[in-house]
Amino acid sequence: MKRRTKTGRSSTIFALVAAGSLVLAACGNGDSGGSSDDGGGTAGGGEEDASEVQVMTWWAQGSEKAGLEALVEVFNEQHPDTEFVNAALAGGGGSQAKQKLQADLQAENPPDTFQAHAGAELQDYIDAGQIEDVSNLYDEFGLTDVFPETLMEQLTVDDKIYSIPSNVHRSNVTWVNPAVLEEVGIDPSSPPADLDAWMADMEKVADAGKIPVSLGMDWTQTHLLENILLSELGPEAYNGLWDGSTDWGGSEVNSALTKFGQIVEWSNTDRDGLDWEPALQQVMEGNAAYNVMGDWAVAAYDAQDMTGGEDYLYWPVPGTDGIFNYLADSFTLPVGAPHPGGTKAWLDTISSAEGQLAFNTVKGSIPARTDIDAAEFPEYQQSAMEDFSSDTIVGSLAHGAAAPVAVSTAVNQAIVKFSQGASDVDTLQQELVAATDSLGQ
Ligand code: GAL
């Protein structure tokens, strides 16, 4: 990440490629694409019904809605005969949408396509027989060579591919209010080297009566926790948390949780009722100094005409330089989708170069495709694209890459108890051991 600092200085972070981590092999160079227009046009029921496509996401409000709208604009141009039906349900991180989706899938009443995450989260739907193999569409749309190899590995199960990615987001980003730091005597131009140095700065912010790190509801706390674990354990041991080789009950995790506990204690007391955007707003308004959130935050800053390097700064979470904690939104063809032709049209647009350019420019993410020129994107995305091609890649817990939904849900529950003062660090740790018990078996 080219860290945006107050002085506008940027420092490139070189790759640390640790054994056992996912290493990106950027490949591709294929046809920069566009649409094959054969997904649309068949109307009026039947197996390939393309009269409409009902799309389930949680991009329902604010800057996320704007991203979806940019994508829909391209869709309407590429597939004018297929009606886009918006089934978005508000709630960052899918906090509402995932529950509704679960109920709809169980009732065999699926949407035509839904937003999921590449990696472990997809496994749930595959195991339950709820989504179709769409490998043939990779051939048909010419996608086999345009996605990075490691992303393809995350998407492939037993030689089959069950979804198509629209974008890649980064989880381990700190969003910073430089004016707050200056006010309390911290030099905003040099990010702290590690978590301890960062917490020393946080203490200065707290002593000055401001909130060091603003937080929101359950999943935003899990989001912070995963990045504290990454910072403290390093990428190899962090990866081990998901395959059973790192002990959740060990002293390293305990020490990370103790630090997490201190940061939660310093944070805003209304956290459990806030979604990510109002939590970030506290940093934007100067009530808080820092927020740890995925890079969809850049879209929220854009929406308020705030400028990176001036109104706000961004750094990798201290201690995670050279590591890209990734997640990728990926769309599916559910078993029994009412308009499979419409789904095919949607998957065509979201995977096309034109669709990925329009969407990711607005969403703050980078294209999953490797064949779109970085120069086409705003500054933040350019630095993220560079990092994604050279950093050590690890997967996000809060956003489905590292562990199944059942695990992140159980972690969220344990964290909320902790946030509400109903458990201490040791109890939290025991509950996390139980929540992750199924991993690596
Ligand atoms: C993630 C999703 C992102 C963004 C974020 C906040 O799970 O992958 O695209 O929507 O939630 O809502």
Image (tube, grey):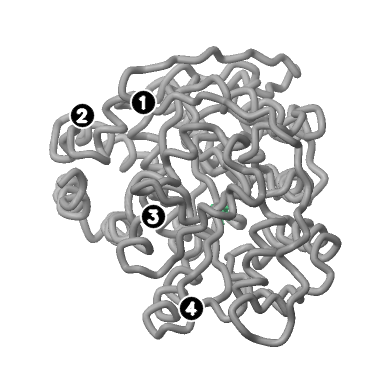
> 155 or 72, which lies in front?
155
Q: Is residue 261 above or below residue 52?
A: above
Q: Amino acid at mark 2?
A: Glu
Marks 3 & 4, CB-CB < 8 Å contact: no
Q: Is mark 4 within 8 Å of ligand 1?
A: no
Q: Earlier along the polypeptide chain: callout 4 or callout 2?
A: 2
Please tell me which residue is depicted at 51% across the width and 24% down the height of the picture.
25
Q: Amino acid at mark 3?
A: Glu
- Label 2 sits on residue: 252
**Other residues around mark 1 within 10 Å, as few (<14) / some (14–19) / many (≥20):** some
- How far is mark 2 from mark 3, CA to CA? 26 Å
User: Residue 44's x, y, as percent?
Assistant: 71, 87
- Label 4 sits on residue: 336
**Other residues around mark 3 within 10 Å, as few (<14) / some (14–19) / many (≥20):** many
Where is residue 291, by image quadrant?
top right
Q: Is residue 254 above or below residue 4?
A: below
Q: Amino acid at mark 1?
A: Ser
- How far is mark 4 from mark 2, CA to CA? 46 Å
Marks 1 & 4, CB-CB < 8 Å contact: no
Q: Earlier along the polypeptide chain: callout 2 or callout 3?
A: 3
**Other residues around mark 2 within 10 Å, as few (<14) / some (14–19) / many (≥20):** some
Q: Earlier along the polypeptide chain: callout 1 or callout 4?
A: 1
Q: Earlier along the polypeptide chain: callout 2 or callout 1?
A: 1
Please tell me which residue is depicted at 50% across the width and 63% down the height of the picture.
94
User: Residue 52's x, y, as percent?
Assistant: 70, 78
- Residue 120 in the figure: left or right of residue 300: left
**Other residues around mark 4 within 10 Å, as few (<14) / some (14–19) / many (≥20):** some
Q: Which numbered circle lies on residue 21?
A: 1
Q: Which numbered circle lies on residue 121?
A: 3
Secondary structure under the numbered disc 2 in the rendered image: helix
Secondary structure under the numbered disc 1 in the rendered image: loop
